[in-house]
Image (cartoon, rainbow, N blue to C red):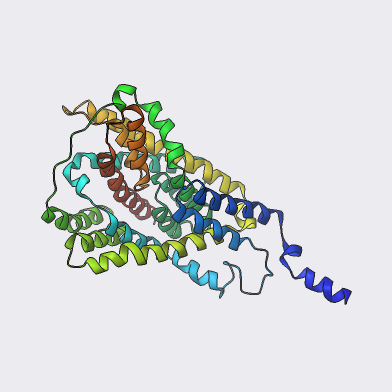
């Protein structure tokens, strides 16, 4: 009887647990706490955190349970990550939820979304100098776009083994936008600049809104053909929304499809962070460089906005430059919040959405350029 009990005990998780798994279980619990208690991107952090718990459960190898074991349920679900299937579907949902009117009303603000992407290429060069391969450096740099789906898509093509740490870093910084961005915004702007008010944008016609996703797809994919899977689905989702005759499809894209894919993406990305694979010096380097990339991207958007004011008769509030990163709509909300701390009557949310939306397009184009350049 004692031998049977010991044999049973040796097959339980209590006997198989490793200290690295314990650390990752704490990390997963922290993600869930931040999502539920602090409301930091709960739609992302809760499934990712739970996925971390699932991926770090101590199980016997050979039972077909681990995400890295061929034939396991989790490995099949993870296929959508490693083959870049989930990110375009999420982009379709984003397109179906996005109103491009604010960007079309003042196209010059699209430059701020492009300027923020400078953080991607600066970090790419920095990662190369630190010894990462070109593919790994490009995947790390894209974290600065603060766009989880784009980071996963590019990493699946250039550095599949880094999907776990890069995805976790990208989504972590997306969730921490309200913490990371305000100090940078205040450092690079003066109180006088933060008080600048901007006039209401012009009204954009329905015809413009319908034509834009068609023209946008053609122009952006001529510039960066490798971005077609992401931008094609983004503009398709937006066209379904604006056409109105396809409202049923648009509703499915922005609700059923994106919600389902977000759950699958979050759980599988979280489950891929097994302690023995995730807790490495390489992962720490990715988190440090990712933070640098995000900070540089924010700063570039702010500095470029200040530069634009040197040539504009009607000044823009440089705070909106920080919204050039792709964390839609969180970075735009942070811009609005910081502006209202200076003047409660200053409403920047609508204006900040223009560079925020263009940042999504810019991040996808940046990923396409890097992918084309390195293959």
Rendered image quadrant of residue 335: top left
Task: Say if 132 sits above or below 4 in the image.
Answer: above
The location of residue 286, given as percent across then percent down, is: 52, 46
Residue at 39% from the left image edge and 43% from the top image edge: 120
> What is the residue that sits farthest to the front in this orientation?
344
Q: How many marks?
A: 0
The location of residue 92, given as percent across then percent down, is: 31, 61
Residue at 35% from the left image edge and 62% from the top image edge: 88
Pick the residue in front: 97 or 321.
97
Position of the N terminus by quadrant: bottom right
Rendered image quadrant of residue 217: bottom left
The location of residue 28, given as percent across then percent down, is: 58, 54
Rendered image quadrant of residue 87: bottom left
Task: Say if 311 sits above or below 102 in the image.
Answer: above
The location of residue 83, given as percent across then percent down, is: 43, 66
Task: Say if 228 sits above or below 106 in the image.
Answer: below
Pick the residue in front: 353 or 310.
353
Res 134 visible = no
Res 168 visible = yes
Pick the residue in front: 262 or 349.
349
């Amino acid at each position: 009887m004692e031998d049977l009990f010991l044999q049973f005990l040796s097959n339980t998780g209590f006997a198989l647990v490793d200290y690295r798994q314990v650390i990752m279980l704490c990390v997963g619990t922290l993600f869930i706490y931040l999502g539920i208690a602090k409301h930091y991107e709960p739609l992302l952090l809760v499934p990712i955190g739970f996925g971390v718990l699932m991926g770090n459960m101590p199980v016997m190898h050979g039972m077909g349970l681990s995400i890295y074991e061929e034939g396991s349920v989790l490995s099949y679900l993870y296929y959508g990550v490693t083959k870049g299937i989930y990110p375009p579907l999420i982009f379709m949902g984003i397109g179906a939820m996005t109103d491009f009117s604010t960007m079309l009303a003042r196209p010059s603000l699209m430059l701020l979304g492009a300027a923020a992407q400078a953080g991607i290429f600066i970090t790419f060069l920095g990662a190369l100098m630190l010894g990462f391969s070109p593919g790994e450096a490009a995947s790390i740099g894209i974290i600065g776009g603060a766009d989880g789906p784009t980071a996963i898509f590019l990493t699946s093509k250039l550095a599949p083994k880094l999907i776990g740490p890069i995805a976790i870093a990208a989504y972590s910084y997306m969730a921490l936008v309200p913490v990371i961005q305000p100090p940078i915004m205040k450092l690079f702007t003066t109180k006088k600049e933060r008080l600048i008010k901007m006039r209401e944008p012009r009204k954009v016609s329905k015809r413009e809104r319908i034509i834009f996703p068609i023209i946008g797809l053609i122009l952006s994919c001529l510039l960066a053909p490798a971005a077609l899977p992401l931008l094609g689905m983004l503009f398709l989702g937006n066209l379904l929304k604006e056409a109105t005759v396809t409202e049923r499809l648009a509703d499915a894209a922005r609700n059923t499809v994106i919600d389902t894919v977000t759950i699958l993406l979050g759980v599988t990305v979280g489950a891929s962070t097994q302690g023995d694979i995730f807790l490495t010096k390489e992962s720490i380097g990715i988190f440090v460089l990712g933070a640098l990339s995000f900070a540089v991207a924010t700063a570039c958007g702010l500095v470029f906005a200040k530069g634009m004011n040197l040539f504009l008769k009607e000044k823009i509030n440089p705070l909106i430059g920080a919204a050039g990163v792709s964390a839609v709509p969180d970075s735009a909300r942070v811009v609005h919040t910081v502006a209202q701390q200076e003047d409660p009557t200053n409403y920047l949310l609508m204006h900040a959405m223009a560079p925020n939306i263009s940042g999504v397009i810019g991040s996808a184009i940046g990923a396409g350029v890097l992918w084309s350049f390195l293959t």
